[in-house]
Image (cartoon, rainbow, N blue to C red):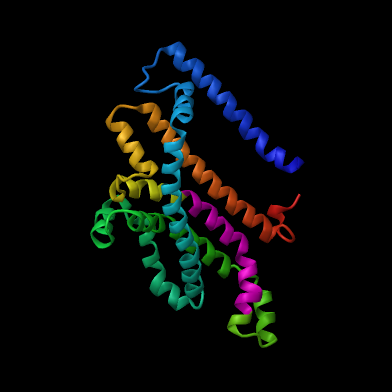
Amino acid sequence: MRRLLNGILPPVIVLIATIIIAEVLIRALGIAEYLLPRPTAVFKVFHEQYPDLLRSLWTTAEAALIGFGCSAVFGLLIALFLSTSRLVQRAFYPYTVFFQTVPVVAIAPLLVIWFDAGLKAVAICAFIVSVFPVIANSLAGLLSTEPALRDMFRLYGAGWWATMWKLKLPSALPNIVTGLRIAAGLAVIGTIVGEFVAGVLDVNPGLGIKVIEAKKYGQTDVVFAAVLTASLLGLLMLAAVNFLGWLLLRRWHASEQG
């Protein structure tokens, strides 16, 4: 409990102080609402429109979770494949960088053509944006296994699968969790960007669509509320990954002890 409080209280205190300072400065400087809304105006939007925001949050969360789940599974599988030999890495790893460098806004229209606008296209955007950190970090962990331990497994005649399952994967867990932490936030970003281009305005539009609609009518306070809701989704996904990392590493890794 003490560790939990120590982890939660400092950022909460900083957040409250930032909100108070922002409210005072915006009022003192007389900044127009359409340029920078006061925190109280944003909280009013949360209070008055929370049902709509929750529905939009669910739509965005569905696409983000699908994209993140696919990036976790396929990213790890690709890393396992790349770790089989140096030749495989030299042949295929450069192409995985495509996921990191491709401008998702540019290819989102193609995804609409191929998969139609909606959940599938938006989830693929989230996958494209978030998969590379999983590949890169997982591969780094798999390749950094202690050489002496690899030699010992080889000495005792352990096969590829036994070495991978009992040695390399456990050793790579900290790196894999790090990749998942990065991917969790990027999946939300990819989802919002995907909704800008490939989302659909239906009964439950995502947060990205809500941002576009609010911007069109000059509702800056609604834009801030939607962006903060998306940030909350990213924080919740990151917290889930952190909890998973704690479960996997708490008994033996220094990063989760103390």
Residue 57, horizontal then vertical, whole percent: 45, 43
Residue 244 visible in the current orientation: yes
Residue 167, horizontal then vertical, whole percent: 65, 74
Q: Residue sitting at 53 percent across and 20 percent down? A: 21
Residue 89, horizontal then vertical, whole percent: 44, 73
Q: Is residue 213 above or below residue 218?
A: below
State left or right for residue 72 relative to residue 166. left
Would residue 78 be counted in the magenta stretch?
Answer: no
Q: Is residue 22 above or below residue 70?
A: above
Q: Quadrant of the N terminus?
A: top right
Q: Residue sitting at 49 percent across and 71 percent down? A: 77
Q: Which residues are magenta?
A: 163-185
Q: Is residue 101 above or below residue 95?
A: above
Q: Residue sitting at 36 percent across and 17 percent down? A: 32
Q: Residue sitting at 35 percent across and 54 percent down? A: 122
Q: Characterize the magenta stretch by its predominant secondary structure.
A: helix
Of residues 187 and 254, the one drawn nearer to the viewer in this rendering: 187
Q: Quadrant of residue 176?
A: bottom right
